[in-house]
Image: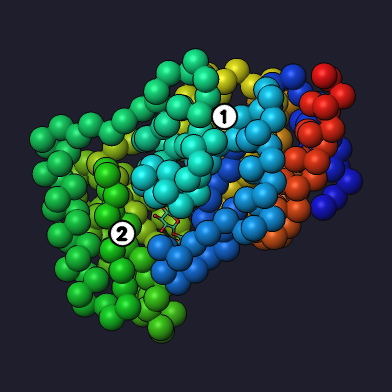
Amino acid sequence: MSDDLQDALDRAAAAPRLLVALDFDGTLAPFTEDPADSRPLPAAREALDALAQLPHTTVAVISGRPLEFLRTVVDPDSRMVLSGSHGAEVDLSAAPGAGSGTRIELSAQQSDLLERAVAATLALVARYPGARAEPKPAGVAFHARPIADPGEAQQALEEMTAVYEAMPGLRLTPGQLVVECSVLGATKGDGLATIAAAVHPDVTVFAGDDVTDEDALAVLGPGDVGIKVGEKDSMARWRVADPPALAACLSLLAHRRTRAMTSMK
Ligand SMILES: O=P(O)(O)OC[C@H]1O[C@H](O[C@H]2O[C@H](CO)[C@@H](O)[C@H](O)[C@H]2O)[C@H](O)[C@@H](O)[C@@H]1O
């Protein structure tokens, strides 16, 4: 971790109200072939558990995953604020007095479009051995990671993208060996803005690895700490190599925040 990032985390740890918001896949959890197998790294989980128990400190996970997955796999103890489906779902129940959040309610037209998108995804999955469909409340993801041949995986992603693009009303989200579509237009920037409006942080720390995380990085202010995980282009001011390096940052932040909150007592 660079000295500059350590300084930024030290400053964040001393904030009167701190929000630590994190992407899940590729940030808290390393990639796995089957999305159902993903889990946060133990060091990251330990740091988040410690942070979530501190006063004036909110931990949030903002992910493309369905909210229900985040509730059951990432935060079974309901200590974190959660945003699923790329910002379309928000559960604020871990933030006292903040209200309930945002639920997905689809119109009949949106439900029909979603049904057609799922059918088109399953049709392509049937043509590419190994490919997988992941249905979501307002969309569906086509996964190419399990396709053995990289050229074939790329071709499958391009075909799926073309199919989604030909269906008016779908919003496309590219990702890491995945292409997703949604019948809603929400972004992770919307999710982070909703959470920040509810918990009023003085400083927000946000980390993410993918192109969708740029929407969240875009709503950070000059005093916030935006961290890119990995090597992709980013507007983030700070960068770490991979999920273990991010877990080390979270451990440091948890340690410093614990000390800051203890000395305030
Ligand atoms: O916003 P995120 O938390 O980063 O979620 C983005 C998508 O991540 C998942 O797919 C990615 O991780 C899988 C498990 O490691 C991997 O198999 C896949 O290749 C990656 O693209 C998830 O399955 C999607 O629903 C998320 O939208």
Which circle marks residue 219 in the picture?
1
**Front in this rendered view, residue 139 or 262:** 262
**Front in this rendered view, residue 80 or 190:** 80
Q: In which quarter of the image is residue 206?
A: top right
Mark 2 Cα shell of 10 Å, populated few (<14), some (14-19), many (≥20): some
Coordinates of residue 194 in the picture (x, y in percent): 47, 24
Of the residues shown, which amino acid type is indicated by label 1? Val
What is the total number of numbered labels drawn onto the structure image? 2
**Residue identified by numbered label 2:** 134
Q: In this view, does 129 lie above or below 65?
A: below
Q: Helix, strand or loop at disc 2?
A: strand
Closer to the chain start, of discs 2 and 1, is 2
Looking at this rendering, what residue extends furthest in the bottom direction? Answer: 149
Q: Residue at x 76, y 53 (%)?
A: 248
Q: In this view, does 102 lie to the left or right of 261?
A: left
**Front in this rendered view, residue 87 or 183:** 87
Of the residues shown, which amino acid type is indicated by label 2? Glu
